[in-house]
Image (cartoon, rainbow, N blue to C red):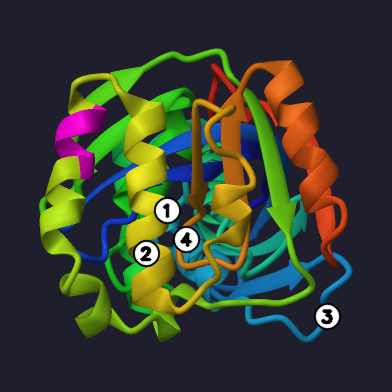
Amino acid sequence: MDGQGRAVAPAAGTVLNALATGRGSAFAIDLETTATVDLDATGEFWGEIADAPDADTDLVERCAELAVAEWGGSGDERDDGDGAVGATVRTESEVPMAAGLKSSSAAANATVVATADALGVEPDPLEACRIGVRAARDAGVTVTGAFDDASASMLGGVTVTDNERDELLSHEVVDWDVLVWWPDAQAFSADADVERCRRVAPLADLVADLALDGRYGEAMTVNGFAFCGALGFPTEPLLEGMPAVDGVSLSGTGPSYVAVGSPDALESLAGHWNERDGTTWHTTTRQTGCRTT
């Protein structure tokens, strides 16, 4: 069999890190990962990541494998029974890896949706999202399953989730200006100190309540201070944004920081963040999520 599919998925920034309590919140930002999937009859799954030939491809291979297992028996490009279905997955991304900007969730979503596209299937977005989350757990790239990050990337806007149940608690379309700073470093989510994060559970509960009340900026800032403390990141980038920005936080398990607010407030904050080693980027939220192209 053969068939090709292509999809793009946005990155995301953090409102609430789910490591403390299992509840999390994230918002889609205008940085994209693209996945192209070519089906074949080998029964094998291969991954390639553009500009990173030595990068681990277990996640995207597992995403394609699970998607074929889920939908390979339906759609115009279904297996005809003459052989097993395999796939080659190629991804390219604007999202830095291991920076806390949900590169894994974006890659997983794009791969699952591209595989469905190659199979001639239009999946339910949350069903596709949960397949990517399962693949992330299987590949060991996440502690929580990252349903908060994945749902924001899949749906666009801002989501609040229960990651222990893979349940969507709220979803809202938002239109924010966003400033991102990522230093020249990496921090892998699977390596985070979960026990230290659980110590800030009372603050995480407060952040969840704020987010469910639509007070996302306040939620981000409380989250930022709590998880900078738990994960050992500096709070100076947060303080440089206060009180002018609406919200500022460590994104994921770092090392990136994200802020939302008025263009003038973010421009002022960029003046501080530009003095730091790394990259500062002014962007916006994404109202739409993962889509075929």
Q: Secondary structure at mark 3?
A: loop
Return the residue nearer the eye: 214 or 37: 214
Residue bearing mark 4: 63
Q: Mark 1 touching mark 2, by CB under 8 A?
A: yes
| Mark 1 neighbour class, 10 Å CA radius: few under 14, some 14 to 19, many 20 or more | many
The reply to whether the magenta stretch includes residue 208 is: yes
Q: Answer yes or no: is residue 229 visible.
A: yes
Q: Which residue is mark 3?
A: 53
In the rendering, which numbered label is found on residue 227?
Answer: 2
Q: Is residue 53 left or right of residue 28?
A: right
Label located before the other in sequence (3 or 4): 3
The magenta stretch is: 207-211
Q: Earlier in the sequence, mark 4 or mark 2?
A: 4
Image quadrant assignment for residue 211: top left
Q: Which mark is residue 224?
A: 1
Q: Earlier in the sequence, mark 1 or mark 4?
A: 4
Q: Residues within 10 Å of mark 4 (few under 14, many from 20)?
A: many
Residue 225 is covered by the magenta coloring: no
Identity of the residue drawn at 83% across and 80% down: 53
Mark 3 surroundings within 10 Å by alpha-carbon count, few (fewer than 14), some (14 through 19), many (20 or more): few
Relative image position of residue 218 (x, y in whole percent): 35, 32
